[in-house]
Amino acid sequence: MSSQHGMIAARPCVKRACAASLLATVILAFSPIRAHAQSKSEHTPRQLTPPLDVTVRIDPTAFKAGGKWHLVYELRVANLGRWDCQVKSIEVLTSEAPSKSLASYGDAGLDVVMSHPGVETGGKTVDASKKTTIGPEAIAIAYMWVTFNKLEDVPEKIRHRIIMKIGDYPEAITLERVPIAVNRNPVVAISPPLRGDGWLAANGPSNISIHCRALIPINGHAYISQRYAIDWVQLYPDGKTYHGDPEDNRNYRAYGAEIHAVSDGIVTETKDGIQQNIPDEKPVVPTTLETIGGNYVIVQIGDGVFAFYAHMRPGSLRVKVGDRVRRGDILGLLGNSGNSSEPHLHFHICSASSEFACEGLRYTFPSYDFLGNGVTWKSSGVHGPPMKLEMEIPPENDIVRFQQ
């Protein structure tokens, strides 16, 4: 990705989503590289059973993005044994016999999928050969992303086959997981929170998005509230987010854009009065769980369904707690407050009235125009014709036009 200042591929707000910089201090502090419990001269005996505890806290849920259907979920893998466990492959299968392979991760693909909370997010790097190794009493997360051509291809249940090596025992062993139910229920349909063209879905849904991997413990429970979150920045035709002085918020195309209610609902939380940042500078207000979202609004739009709008301009909020809003109402103006490095709207839907103590929920827009992708956006201003898409969510770096 380009490092040129102002080109969307290089904008730091794309890298500093609501919770990204806070993860170093609040993320689960498990280390994948632990001291061996056994002496170096002791060899690993044959295992009676795979020593892993594998849990899926949130059922895989189907949603449409980029013209295809996807399942997004996480496997939390704990090693309860005395020896290092090196995961060799993870395969997703249909539950019926004979089973059908839906996705398989091994070699280089596996170390992209697996992560060690508290190590990589703590500013440290993990050698690729060790990313797939889980030490004794340690935990790893496998971020799963399975793609299908159409909804009919998505099974009602799936299971997993994990092949691993334990310590220095020469033979691999296999763990077969019991079937896991897939959520194929209809997706929440919402109106866009913004209007106009040139909106880029920075940090949008993908299996490498920092939002999708923002696992944050709150009050003793770890959540991914931003699983389907998007940082909306707005591009000029030349692919830049600003013209003129890059340190002036007013020079950014997105700045001051009206933020609209995506559905009817009741305002459950607001925050206002947080000073705005100078673009690309350290946040003016120290980043805490109370300030990270900047000025924000949370609206309950259904039973256990809440819309979160963050980084708004101070003094621009037009609603208060308890207000009833209608779809399309203006909630406030887009700004650069909280953990934000340039004007943008952080938006997501989750399961509770909280910034982070909730699980991110999928959603869809009834229609929008696809204009291109931020990675391949041409600086000449000449772009292909728009493509109308229906009942989808834009994936990471897609550029779209919203009507209403």
Image (cartoon, rainbow, N blue to C red):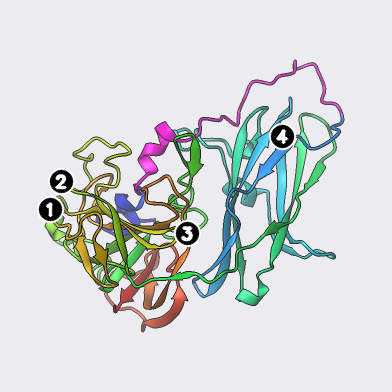
> Within 10 Å of the Cα at label 3, are there few (<14), some (14-19), or many (20+) other Cα atoms?
many
Q: Earlier in the sequence, mark 3 or mark 2?
A: 2
Residue 137, quarter of the rendered image: top right
Q: How many marks?
A: 4
* Label 1 packing within 10 angstroms: few (<14), some (14-19), many (20+): some
Residue 199 locus on image (x, y percent): 30, 68
Q: Is residue 293 visible?
A: yes
Residue 370 image position (x, y, % from top left): 39, 76
- Disc on the earlier residue, 4 or 1: 4
38 drawn magenta = yes
Q: Which residue is mark 2?
A: 273
Q: Position of residue 299 (x, y in %)?
A: 32, 59
The residue segment tinted magenta is 17-45
Determine crowd level at label 2: few under 14, some 14-19, many 20+ residues with C-alpha closer than 10 A: some
Please name which of the two marks, 4 or 1, marks the residue nearer to the observer: 1
Residue to which mark 1 is pinned: 315
| Residue, disc 4 | 85
Give 255 or 193, whichever is nearer the viewer. Answer: 193
Q: How far apart, in angstroms, are the residues tagged by discs 1 and 2?
A: 6 Å
Tell me what residue is drawn at x 69 percent, y 68 percent. Answer: 155
| Amino acid type of the residue that numbered disc 4 sits on in the rendered structure | Cys
Question: Considering the numbered disc 1 on the image, is that residue within a helix, a strand or a loop?
Answer: loop
Instruction: Kindly state the secondary structure of the residue where label 3 is placed.
Output: loop
Which disc is residue 361 wearing? Answer: 3
Q: Amino acid at mark 3?
A: Leu
Which is more N-terminal, label 3 or label 1? 1
Q: Which is nearer the eye, 348 or 398? A: 348
**Callout 1 touching callout 2 (CB < 8 Å):** yes
| Amino acid type, label 2 | Gly
In the displayed structure image, the side of residue 366 where residue 311 appears, left or right: left
